[in-house]
Image (spheres, rainbow, N blue to C red):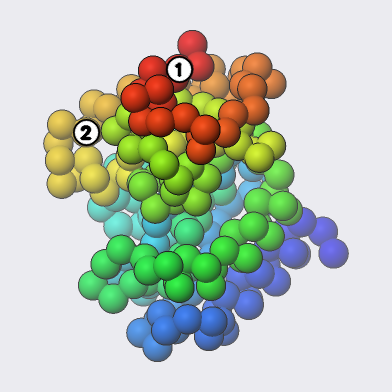
């Protein structure tokens, strides 16, 4: 089975998944989409209303802004793989709960093992917390570090900029760093965020 077929198999499993209570209100599971050999995987938090209806990630207002941000660095959504830490919509777009995060963890682990991206960009604090558990996103957004062998760059979620316009410029600046970060992935050292406190994390920067 090739990589593309393996991702389709995971998507099929997600469409029938009953590992947590989110399946009760699910219209469509949202496994994610993009090339099976994508250099960059973007991981959001969870599907919203439009994603639940269409079964595709980032198709609402936040998705439109996300596509605009990609365009500023010469990329398209077709160039990257886009997914979430939970694959079904939490009711009322509430934050994902721990049980739900754990239920979906295996799906995301398998997707990343298949794609083997050069870089993972987390969008929002819940996807960031999957890799970096003791830092604030306001301190470390846009900073690349290798965590357990995986290159991780935390960003704010595009939806946050829709609610807080001041974050729009922050996201634009962080996205502008991506081409250079991708070109220099081998220079990023292994780093354990757990060993640093927030004041130290605030001072970290790749360049």
**Residue 22: where, in percent of width, then height?**
41, 80
**Residue 108: where, in percent of width, then height?**
59, 59
Measuring 26% from the left and 67% from the top, which residue is drawn there? 94
Count residues near mark 1 (Cα–Cα under 10 Å), then give few for <14, some for 14-19, many for 20+. few
Measuring 53% from the left and 85% from the top, which residue is drawn there? 18
Quarter where residue 155 is shown: top left
Instruction: Tell me which numbered mark, 2 or 1, is placed earlier along the sequence.
Output: 2
Nearer the observer, 121 or 20: 20
Q: Nearer the viewer, mark 2 or mark 1?
A: 1
Q: Which residue carries the number 1 mark?
A: 205
Q: CA distance from mark 2 to mark 1?
A: 19 Å
Measuring 61% from the left and 70% from the top, which residue is drawn there? 11
Q: Is residue 44 visible?
A: yes
In the rendered view of the protein, which quadrant contains the N terminus? bottom right
Q: Is residue 69 visible?
A: no
Quarter where residue 141 is shown: top left
Which residue in the rendered view is the most extreme toward the right?
Answer: 1
**Residue 188: where, in percent of width, then height?**
62, 21
Total marks in image: 2
In the image, taking residue 100 as reference, residue 62 lies left or right, namely left
Q: Which residue carries the number 2 mark?
A: 167
**Residue 101: where, in percent of width, then height?**
47, 66
């Amino acid at each position: 089975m090739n990589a593309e077929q393996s991702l389709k198999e995971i998507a099929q499993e997600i469409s029938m998944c009953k590992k947590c209570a989110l399946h009760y209100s699910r219209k469509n599971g949202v496994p994610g989409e993009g090339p099976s050999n994508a250099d960059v995987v973007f991981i959001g938090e969870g599907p919203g209303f439009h994603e639940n209806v269409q079964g595709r990630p980032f198709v609402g207002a936040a998705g439109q802004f996300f596509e605009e941000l990609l365009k500023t660095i010469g990329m398209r959504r077709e160039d990257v793989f886009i997914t979430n830490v939970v694959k079904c919509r939490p009711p009322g777009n509430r934050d994902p709960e721990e049980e739900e995060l754990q239920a979906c963890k295996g799906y995301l682990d398998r997707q990343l093992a298949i794609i083997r991206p050069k870089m993972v960009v987390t969008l929002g604090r819940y996807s960031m917390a999957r890799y970096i558990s003791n830092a604030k996103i306001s301190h470390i957004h846009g900073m690349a570090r290798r965590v357990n062998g995986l290159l991780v760059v935390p960003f704010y979620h595009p939806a946050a900029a829709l609610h807080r316009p001041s974050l729009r410029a922050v996201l634009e600046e962080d996205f502008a760093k991506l081409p250079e970060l991708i070109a220099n992935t081998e220079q990023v050292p292994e780093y354990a965020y757990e060993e640093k406190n927030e004041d130290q994390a605030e001072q970290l920067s790749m360049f």
